[in-house]
Image (cartoon, rainbow, N blue to C red):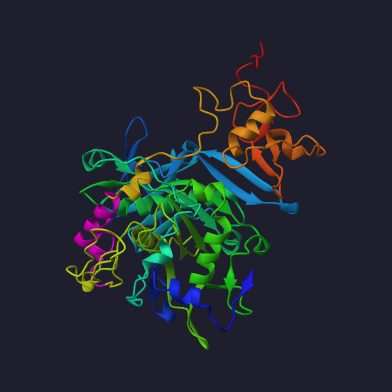
Amino acid sequence: MKTIRRTTSCWTMLLRLFFCCLLILEHEVRAVPLRQTIVYPKVVQSRDDGTGHIVVITKDLSLSLEKSPSVFSEYFLTRNYGEGGKIFDKYVPAESIEKNLFHDDNAVASIFLTQEGGLRMEGVIGHRLRIKPIETAERSLDGDVAHILIENEPKKAVARRDDEKRMGELFSLENHPGVRVAARTNEAERRKTIARPEIHLLLDSHFTKAMSYDRERIHRYIAVFMNSVNIRYRTVQEFKIQLLIVGMTLVWSEQDEPWVVSGYTDSNLLFDLESLLAIDAQYLNQREYIQADIFFAITGRDLAFIVSDSFMSHLVMGYSFLGRACAPFKVGISEDEPETYEGIWVFTHEIAHLLGSTHDSEGPYPLIPGNNGAEHCPFEDGYIMSYHNKHDENRNRFSTCTVEQMHVFLSLNSSSCLYENNTHAWFPPTKTYAGEGNYSLDEFCYTIYGPVMPNVRYNKTVSYEPYYSCAVRCTAEGVEHDYVVDVPDGYPCVDAPHKICIGGRCVLDPRTRKRRV
């Protein structure tokens, strides 16, 4: 973790001209609950196949829930760091989470719903309400599980316009490792397809600590979070955008986040631009950065920015570089207080910047060919690319100016990668288990890490540890740390080939287990 100097470099000051930010009033950094109500949701109607439910929450609030489209790639990477510099990778099947993910577009509701032992629903409804079960509370007379329905006051925001000077040469870095240029696609073909920006998330140690370092809990939360973001992008009728999370880096310890540029002795502060540039510098040669269209950090810290050599402001919630998806500096950062979903709107806003959109009421952005800006869309209308909270009905939608700007950006040849699937193809799933197949451990390591570490191999020189029964330790010359990756379901246990790995555990193969007579 770094501590900011009292002076800023010329490079930093120049780059500050190009990022976009979201500012809020200082005394409203965290939303304050207006009302908390105990409710007992009840499913009153369901489809036979379980893909839809009508749920009554209160006499005035019902949801018509539908099974949600994917928010993760089929197998998404989850990475965290262990002792001795080891990197632990796990590829998680999206279906294990998404099978319980539902939405109601009209209510802007994103819900994780289960019914084992009673209906439990956790998620967010619009930008004011969130709901979660209370396991310690008594059930209703009908046996329904108690939930708490929390209403928050939306944050009031103020806008700050950055210096209007533009220096395009700062971004003309053709040799930047983050550049991925795909085959050209014509306009007619693109209108028939869905733009799927592939995003790798970086979750900082303050965020993961607040989630008790619980991977499954984090996965559920991010699923609901991203589902809510995608609801907002589905309001665009002219073309289709579906954000996909292809990986997450979960930072457990502050020692593993050297990119954090903090505020003097306050480790809860994070300087926005300085940290964002450090993220780009640290990860730009990493596979997860190169293969993603967008690399985005979510922090549980309080973002701040330097106003002058002697003054800093806490009025920032998010930063990203305008129009940089698939290009150098394809990075963004935003705040979120875990379990509150406060950061959904900010994240949606910052992704729109990366997809080529200015703030409402701002002029054209000359670095994006064909960008006409948003001068004809009043700031006061309160759409997503504004900070004005006057019109609730607009807060979850994009203005026509934003839609036009995103359409222009998505039509550029430089944005072609948003239409291709660049998810790392590791072991193709079979009808039963993804890990079925005759792969050596060397082949396994190469399949996962070969694209960026051609000399990678299975490290069989280390002493056996119980964890590695369903994980493989991969090493490569010139790479400082080993990578430990979970094997896919169905793969033989490393230390017990007669068994297979299911969910990271070494078990008897259920397909060959005989029934007792």
Name, please, the residue furthest toward the top. Answer: 517
Q: Quadrant of the N terminus?
A: bottom right
Residue 495 appears in which quarter of the rendering? top right
Inspect the magenta stretch and tell me whether residue 492 lies in it.
no
Q: Residue at x 64, y 79 (%)?
A: 265
Measured as percent of width and height from the top left, residue 44 is found at: 32, 42
Measured as percent of width and height from the top left, residue 173 is found at: 45, 58
Measured as percent of width and height from the top left, residue 491 is found at: 63, 27
The one of 277 and 145 positioned closer to us in this rendering? 277
Q: Looking at the picture, does residue 55 appear above or below residue 281?
A: above
Q: Quadrant of the C terminus?
A: top right
Name, please, the residue furthest toward the bottom. Answer: 310
The one of 500 and 377 positioned closer to us in this rendering? 377
Direction from residue 471 to residue 416 in the image, left or right? left
The one of 367 and 316 positioned closer to us in this rendering? 367
Direction from residue 23 to residue 235 in the image, left or right? left
Q: Residue at x 38, y 40 (%)?
A: 420
Residue 168 appears in which quarter of the rendering? bottom left
Q: How many marks?
A: 0
Q: Is residue 72 visible?
A: yes
Q: Is residue 150 visible?
A: no
Q: Looking at the picture, does residue 5 appear above or below residue 53?
A: below
Name, please, the residue furthest toward the right. Answer: 463
Inspect the magenta stretch and tell me whether residue 394 lies in it.
yes
Name, please, the residue furthest toward the left. Answer: 376
Residue 351 appears in which quarter of the rendering? bottom left
**Prevailing SS of the magenta stretch:** helix
The one of 115 and 243 positioned closer to us in this rendering? 243
Measured as percent of width and height from the top left, residue 220 is found at: 49, 48
Which segment did they paint magenta? Answer: 390-411
